[in-house]
Image: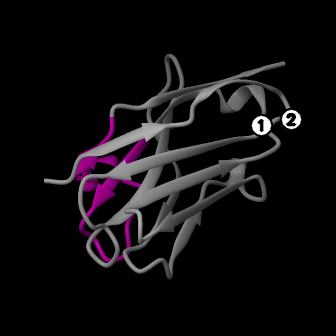
Amino acid sequence: QVQLVESGGGLVQAGGSLRLSCAASERTAGVYSMGWFRQAPGKEREAVATISRYGSTIYYRDSVKGRFTISRDNTKNTLYLQMNSLKPEDTAVYYCAACSAMIPTTTLRSWDYWGQGTQVTVSS
């Protein structure tokens, strides 16, 4: 089974940027759809952005559209999330996930593999 390791989280001021990375232990291009999720304290985990197996379908939740960009480097088996214009409400633990669906959904139970998460804190 694929193993996922996130990195790139940290503390940033509002308006700043961070780039999260998710390194996979095996080839993901054409095999897995990938996604970024987040969970703030006391809240449910939610989908932030997803990208289909071949990268043809991308989803962003409304609150991050125009600010976040999901991408995948197939040569490195790595998924990225570029986060710009960060807001305090973006503070959460961010998780990388993979699923075998050709076109992924945002339903958590449809995702098969999860990373351990990386903390993102945005100060006001």
| Residue 36, image x, y percentages | 48, 49
Magenta segment includes 12: no
Crowding around mark 2 (Cα neighbors within 10 Å: few <14, some 14 to 19, many 20+) is: some
Task: Please say if 54 is above or below 12.
Answer: below
Residue shown at the point (51%, 77%) measured from the top left: 57
Task: Judge by depth and name the residue closer to the eye, 44 or 35.
Answer: 35
Q: Is residue 119 above or below residue 5?
A: above
Q: Is residue 88 left or right of residue 55?
A: right
Pointer 1 local density, CA inside 10 Å: few below 14, some 14–19, many at least 20: many
| Residue type marked 2 | Gly
Discs 2, 1 touching: Cβ within 8 Å: yes
Residue ID at (41%, 63%):
76
Q: Quadrant of residue 124?
A: top right
The region drawn magenta spans: 95-115
- Direction from residue 123 to residue 100 in the image, left or right: left
Q: Mark 2 sits on what residue?
A: 15
Residue 102, magenta (yes or no): yes
Q: Which mark is residue 86?
A: 1
Report x, y in % for residue 61: 61, 54
* Residue at x-position 44% and y-position 55%: 35
- Residue 123 percent location from the top left of the image: 78, 18
The x and y percentages for residue 11 are: 68, 21
Left or right: where does residue 116 sit relative to residue 13?
Answer: left
Viewer-closest of 23 and 112: 23
Does 24 sit above or below residue 15?
Answer: below
Applied colour scheme: one colour
In the displayed structure, does residue 83 sit left or right of residue 37?
A: right
Q: Report the amino acid beneath label 1.
A: Leu
Q: Is residue 90 above or below residue 70?
A: above
